[in-house]
């Protein structure tokens, strides 16, 4: 099952924290891929980046691929600058989305299943 969702707000501060609640109603446990449209997101901050990392980590644990589409140049630039575009799939066209091969150190560090001492 493929699930599509459009984020309706910037991923900044409290808006970023609300992303998990926005996605709670979706049938993600039965999905193979969640395609998240960021067409309405022009800004992202640390809260938004953490929200995406946590979402990715939770979906990966369930065997679900996260794909970001309709990403603005500003948001894509932030993802690339922080090395996060390599694990949050940002397709430039309609090619099939493949799971990423390597996970950056940031993802391993923020993974909720790991204790940080």
Image (cartoon, grey):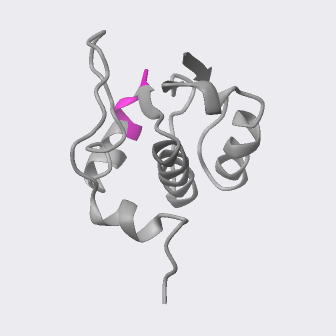
Given the current orientation, which residue lies at the most extreme top position? 94
Q: Nearer the viewer, residue 34 or 37?
A: 34
Asked if one can make out residue 7 in the rendered structure from this viewpoint, the answer is no
Location of residue 100 with respect to 61 vertically, above or below: above
Q: Position of residue 34 (x, y in %)?
A: 52, 27
Q: Position of residue 114 (x, y in %)?
A: 49, 73
Q: Does residue 12 sit above or below 113 in this rendering? A: above
Q: Is 72 contained in the magenta span?
A: yes
Q: Quadrant of residue 82?
A: bottom left
| Residue found 33% across the figure and 33% down from its top | 89
Left or right: where 115 falls relative to 14: left
Which quarter of the rendered picture does the N terminus lie within? top right
Residue at the far bottom in the pictured view: 117
Image coordinates of residue 75 in percent, x first then y, are 41, 39
Question: Considering depth in this image, is 30 or 99 the residue closer to the camera?
Answer: 30
Question: Which of the pair 41/56 is nearer the observer?
Answer: 56
Instruction: Specify the segment rendered in magenta.
Output: 69-75
> Is-magenta flag for residue 41?
no
In the rendered image, the residue lying farthest to the left is: 101
Name the residue located 57 percent from the left edge and 18 percent from the top edge: 4
How far from the left and from the top, in percent, is residue 115? 52, 79
Q: Residue at x 69, y 52 (%)?
A: 17
User: Quick check: can you spot residue 62?
Assistant: yes
């Amino acid at each position: 099952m493929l699930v599509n969702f459009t984020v309706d707000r910037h991923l900044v501060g409290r808006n970023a924290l609300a992303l998990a609640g926005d996605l709670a109603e979706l049938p993600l446990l039965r999905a193979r891929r969640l395609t998240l449209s960021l067409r309405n997101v022009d800004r992202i901050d640390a809260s938004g980046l953490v929200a995406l990392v946590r979402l990715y980590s939770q979906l990966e644990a369930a065997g679900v691929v996260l794909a970001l589409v309709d990403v603005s140049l500003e948001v894509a630039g932030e993802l690339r600058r922080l090395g996060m575009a390599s694990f949050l799939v940002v397709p430039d066209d309609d090619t099939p989305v493949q799971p990423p091969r390597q996970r950056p150190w940031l993802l391993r560090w923020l993974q909720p299943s790991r204790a940080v001492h």
